Amino acid sequence: MRPFFRQLRILILLLVLLFVAADAWWVDWRTARWNQTQWVAVYPVNGDGTALTQKYIESLTAEDFQSIGEFFMKEAKFFELSLPEPTKIVFGHIVDERPPAIPEQRKGLAVALWSLKLRYWAFRANQLDDTAPDIKMFVVYHDPATHAGLAHSTGLKKGKVGVVNAFASRALAQSNNVVIAHEVLHTLGATDKYGGGGLPRFPEGYAEPDREPLYPQRFAELMGGRIPHSRVEASIPRSLRQVLIGEQTAREISWLR
Ligand SMILES: [Zn+2]
């Protein structure tokens, strides 16, 4: 190849990289200022291919996810965020293809590759939409009768995409919403605040770390995940009514400075 064309090709590649970096920086900056509502689109996926799960996801509407938006509004008010509605939860559409499975070992090259694959998959799944949400949450449903436990859920800050494994059950819809809200906050930069055995870390994983007596706690901290009953016992919140956002999480998502 002639040097001119080679240089031109390198220049174009550099411009693309610069554009990608600038775009990521711009998204982070805009989110961190919280002067604009973040649109969160929920896309249901049939995770086990059963007719029961299909029927369930076809019955879902935006209404089923509103407790998430209401929760963020209530918490934003508590932290005196000037934006009254930090997130708007919208219903995307059913996605037929399952997202790439989360690797067992959650570190290293496998995770980096999976993260790229997931972002590409999310880009394709959402290509035909006329809306461009800020955050995409793919909720993969499973029949609770045949799936006692679920694989990990995840939320990526880069690409602002999350995959939530959930139960196809009306009775568990509100606890699914707790997991969705948790993963939404990961996409906004919040970190996990639980340690071994899934127990919330003290004090950052506690909703009311100053409460006296400390136990039992009344609420779970969203990124701590569970309601601590004692130093060694904690339970999963049944709905977002049993959840609060703690100070450290609020700092991580720039609600507190
Ligand atoms: Zn987490």
Image (cartoon, helix red, strand yellow):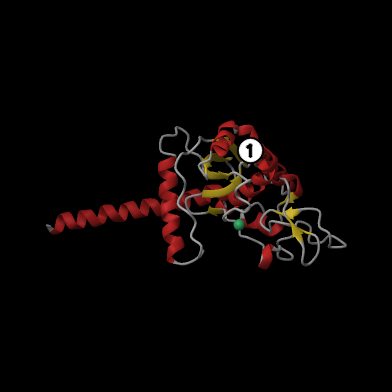
* Ligand 1 picture quarter: bottom right
Q: Quadrant of residue 83?
A: top right
SS state under label 1: helix
Res. 257 visible in picture: no
- Is 178 on the left or on the right of 99, as rendered? right
- For the residue pair 25 and 203, the one nearer the viewer reads as 203
Residue wearing tag 1: 65
Counting from the top left corner in percent of width and height, residue 97 is at 44, 42
| Disc 1 residue crowd, few under 14, some 14–19, many 20+, Cα 10 Å | many
Q: Give me the residue at 72% from left, 45% from top.
A: 239
> Residue most toward the right?
213
Quadrant assignment for the C terminus: bottom right
Is residue 51 visible in the rendered image? The answer is: yes
Relative side of 247 to 42, left or right: right
Vertically, is 160 above or below 211? above
Q: Residue lying farthest front?
A: 146
Q: Is residue 234 left or right of residue 7?
A: right
Vertical comparison of 137 with 7: above or below? above
Left or right side of 155 for 70: right
Viewer-side residue, 54 vs 100: 54
